[in-house]
Image: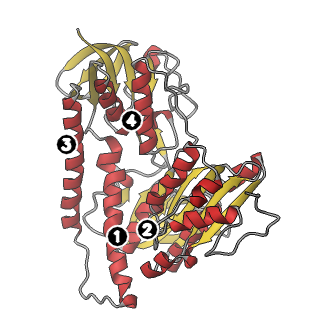
């Protein structure tokens, strides 16, 4: 029987990073994936969705640029050309990962892996089976979109995020069931490209779990663009009608009928544990089937680790990257553990939302805080971009002035948030961030000004009352 030091099951962000790091640390490693290296993120998620969003933003900005003097006629989006370009981007990245694995002697196999014992797996590639043993096994098989009861992907016009990213035509109308991150990112993109957008969300706000102050800007932009939003609502039934669907939804005002050509189901993820044989070896999971681990990624069997989406939310590729690194280093004997205190998130809506650290509500539940707010209307850079609808908010401890959180809803929020993440990771104080010279004119100045406001030294926005801010 072939033997390895470590077998990594799943070649997505968690798995391939773990495999490469193990290879760097001298471990004889096998990486197994049932589909394509890169996982959901590179092949069906993060990368192709951001390519679509980039196309949509270019299209949208070009259309509205007449206001500032740019006139364009005959503008159209060719989705066939886009799909070819997107696939080239994905292929370049996945090929690069395969090369990186090869450079550190990581072996790659394609097939369905299943446990035979807690140290042995069997890999079926569709033709033959191979049994391999290892001292350690890393579970990184990821997750898949959840379907609602009564819906089938065999129905033409019913899609999840995976199918949405392969569309070669823009839907005339799109109903998004689930107003979370993925649903709103894709829905916004298709709306900018010409789709009539409808959103049904079970909770009382879009993007549940996100700071409501940030969400208001996104919701306002969606409504301004003509989106029909149904909160505290759910789909009761759907049926084919003409070239689309008649959908009945239950709302706080009673049942309503709406029409849509395409229905995008975006209501969450389930772990890809089916077929792995976890029951055979007694791996423990939670009520939703996600694998339980400790602060190092260990399961209840100490030589088996779980990382990435298979262990539950938040479903973030950069979280998976870090979990892969930590697990590989722990297996290699290094003293490492997971720390999510400075874990940023980014939502690619319009405007973008990015957050790190404690929310205002969470912080206020723990201690007295000072909140600095910088409206984008005060930003010279935002004015020159014609993008003044947004806010930069920072949260600091009233007692210590330590940075506790940062929340942005503005263009390029996903690029700006790392400054807040670094501040929290380093244990920085408001004065540190406020004293750091930022280039002008930039959006990043807004972070500096928001921090200055918390210590009473803001220049380009109104300062807080003196009895609110801490003494420096």
- Is 319 placed left or right of 369 in the picture? left
Q: Earlier in the sequence, mark 3 or mark 1?
A: 1
Figure quadrant of residue 189: bottom left
Q: Are dots 2 and 1 in contact, CB under 8 Å? A: yes
Against 167, is 148 above or below?
Answer: above
| Residue 164 visible, this angle | no
Front: mark 4 or 2: 4
Q: Are dots 1 and 4 in contact, CB under 8 Å? A: no
Q: Residue at x 45, y 48 (%)?
A: 147
Marks 2 and 3, how far apart at CA: 30 Å
Q: Are dots 3 and 1 in contact, CB under 8 Å? A: no
Marks 2 and 1, how far apart at CA: 8 Å
Q: Look at the image and tell me in which quarter the C terminus lies.
A: bottom right
Front: mark 2 or 3: 3
Secondary structure under tag 2 reads helix
User: How many residues crowd mark 3 within 10 Å: few (<14), some (14–19), many (20+)?
Assistant: few
Q: Earlier in the sequence, mark 2 or mark 1?
A: 1
Q: Which residue is mark 2?
A: 188
| Residue 79 visible, this angle | yes
User: How many residues crowd mark 4 within 10 Å: few (<14), some (14–19), many (20+)?
Assistant: many
- Location of residue 83 in the rendering, given as x and y in whole percent from the top left corner: 22, 61
Q: Residue at x 36, y 50 (%)?
A: 45
Q: Look at the image and tell me in which quarter the N terminus lies.
A: top left
Label for residue 272?
none
Q: Earlier in the sequence, mark 2 or mark 3?
A: 3
**Nearer to us in this view, 409 or 189:** 409
Q: Which residue is mark 4?
A: 14
Q: Which residue is mark 1?
A: 56
Q: In this view, which residue lies farthest toward the right? A: 467
Marks 1 and 4, how far apart at CA: 29 Å
Q: Earlier in the sequence, mark 1 or mark 4?
A: 4
């Amino acid at each position: 029987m072939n033997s390895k030091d470590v077998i990594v099951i799943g070649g997505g962000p968690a798995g391939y990073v773990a495999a490469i790091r193990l290879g760097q640390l001298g471990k004889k490693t096998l990486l197994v994936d049932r589909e394509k290296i890169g996982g959901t993120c590179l092949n069906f998620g993060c990368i192709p969705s951001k390519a679509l969003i980039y196309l949509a933003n270019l299209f949208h900005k070009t259309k509205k640029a007449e206001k500032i003097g740019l006139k364009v006629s005959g503008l159209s989006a060719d989705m066939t050309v886009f799909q070819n370009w997107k696939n080239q981007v994905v292929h370049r990245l996945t090929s690069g990962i395969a090369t990186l694995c090869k450079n550190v002697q990581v072996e790659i196999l394609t097939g369905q892996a299943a446990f035979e014992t807690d140290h042995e797996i069997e890999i079926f590639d569709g033709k033959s089976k191979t049994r391999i043993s290892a001292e350690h096994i890393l579970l990184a098989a990821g997750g898949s979109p959840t379907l609602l009861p009564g819906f089938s992907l065999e129905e033409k016009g019913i899609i999840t995020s995976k199918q949405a990213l392969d569309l070669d035509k823009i839907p005339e109308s799109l109903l998004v069931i689930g107003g979370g991150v993925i649903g709103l990112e894709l829905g916004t993109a298709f709306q900018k490209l010409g789709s009539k957008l409808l959103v049904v969300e079970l909770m009382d706000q879009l993007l549940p779990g996100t700071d409501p102050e940030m969400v208001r800007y996104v919701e306002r932009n969606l409504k301004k663009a003509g989106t029909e939003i149904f909160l505290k609502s759910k789909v009761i039934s759907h049926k084919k009608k003409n070239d689309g669907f008649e959908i009945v939804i239950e709302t706080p005002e009673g049942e309503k009928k709406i029409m849509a050509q395409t229905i995008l189901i975006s209501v969450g993820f389930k772990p890809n544990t089916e077929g792995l044989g976890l029951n055979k070896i007694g791996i423990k999971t939670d009520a939703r089937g996600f694998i339980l681990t400790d602060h190092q990624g260990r399961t209840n069997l100490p030589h088996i680790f779980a990382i990435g989406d298979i262990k539950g939310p938040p479903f973030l590729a950069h979280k998976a990257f870090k979990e892969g690194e930590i697990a590989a280093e722990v297996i290699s004997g290094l003293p490492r553990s997971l720390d999510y205190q400075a874990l940023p998130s980014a939502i690619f809506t319009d405007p973008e939302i990015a957050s790190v650290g404690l929310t205002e509500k969470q912080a206020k539940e723990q201690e007295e805080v000072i909140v600095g707010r910088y409206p984008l209307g005060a930003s010279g850079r935002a004015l020159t971009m014609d993008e003044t609808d947004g806010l930069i908010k920072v949260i600091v401890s009233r007692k210590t002035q330590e940075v506790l959180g940062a929340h942005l809803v503005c263009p390029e929020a996903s690029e700006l948030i790392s400054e807040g993440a670094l501040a929290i990771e380093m244990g920085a104080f408001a004065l540190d961030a406020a004293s750091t010279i930022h280039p002008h004119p930039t959006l990043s100045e807004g972070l500096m000004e928001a921090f200055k406001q918390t210590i009473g030294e803001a220049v380009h926005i109104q300062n807080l009352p003196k009895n609110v801010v801490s003494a420096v």
